[in-house]
Image (cartoon, grey):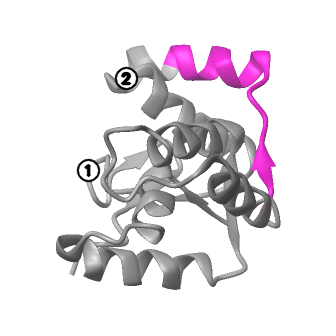
């Protein structure tokens, strides 16, 4: 399974002209069956997609319907062990807590690949490799 980060979900719903290529790529990724995500990723999506300052802001109903549709994928929970592993990863990899939590949620789900543009493309974090799906 491949783990999907928040930015993939946000690009999938983007109507910004300058993000059209990324939006298309993100929708293509989400058509695949071998994906996983986490409750954290879904929460971040909701907050960012519905924020007032977003030009193509989604309504609460639109955002929650999308989240419900993405629950067809396994969704990792934030547990105490995942949180503890995330805290250790902050120190080990020098990442923000939230990025570390993405990595450790992926690891807890057995994912070897994280799809995200928020990390160094191709970097391996002790068995979890990050790939930027928007990179040519």
**Considering depth in this image, is 57 or 26 the residue closer to the camera?**
57
In percent of the image, x 33 and y 52: which residue is there?
A: 123
Residue 36 in the image: state x and y as whole percent.
69, 59
Mark 1: few/some/many CA within 10 Å (<14, 14-19, 20+): few
In percent of the image, x 49 and y 50: which residue is there?
A: 6
The answer to whether marks 1 and 2 mark residues whose Cβ atoms lie closer than 8 Å is no
Check residue 120 in the rendering and tell me which mark sits there, or answer none: 1
Instruction: State the quadrant of the C terminus.
Output: bottom left
Q: Quadrant of residue 84?
A: top right
Q: CA distance from mark 1 to mark 2?
A: 14 Å
Say whether residue 74 is magenta: yes
Instruction: State the quadrant of the N terminus.
Output: bottom right
Check residue 97 in the rendering and tell me which mark sits there, or answer none: none
Say whether residue 111 is magenta: no
**Can residue 115 be seen?**
no
Q: Is residue 127 above or below residue 115?
A: above
Residue 90 in the image: state x and y as whole percent.
42, 19
Answer with left or right where residue 72 lies relative to residue 58. Answer: right
**Considering depth in this image, is 95 or 60 the residue closer to the camera?**
60
**Which residues fall within the magenta stretch?**
73-88
Q: Quadrant of residue 43?
A: top right
Earlier in the chain: of badge 1 and badge 2, it is: 2
In percent of the image, x 43 and y 53: which residue is there?
A: 57
Q: Quadrant of residue 11?
A: bottom left
Q: Is residue 41 above or below residue 33?
A: above
**Can residue 74 be seen?**
yes
For disc 2, the marked residue is 96
Answer with left or right where residue 39 lies relative to residue 4. Answer: right
Residue 47 in the image: state x and y as whole percent.
52, 36
């Amino acid at each position: 399974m491949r783990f999907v980060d928040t930015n993939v979900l946000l690009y999938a719903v983007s109507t910004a002209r300058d993000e059209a290529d990324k939006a298309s790529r993100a929708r293509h990724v989400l058509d695949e069956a071998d994906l996983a995500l986490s409750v954290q990723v879904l929460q971040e999506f909701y907050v960012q997609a519905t924020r007032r300052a977003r030009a193509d802001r989604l309504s609460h109903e639109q955002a929650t319907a999308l989240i419900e549709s993405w629950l067809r994928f396994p969704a990792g929970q934030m547990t105490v062990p995942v949180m503890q592993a995330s805290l250790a990863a902050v120190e080990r990899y020098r990442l923000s807590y939230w990025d570390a939590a993405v990595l450790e949620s992926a690891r807890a789900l057995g994912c070897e690949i994280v799809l995200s543009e928020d990390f160094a493309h191709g970097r391996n974090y002790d068995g979890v490799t990050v790939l930027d799906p928007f990179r040519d």
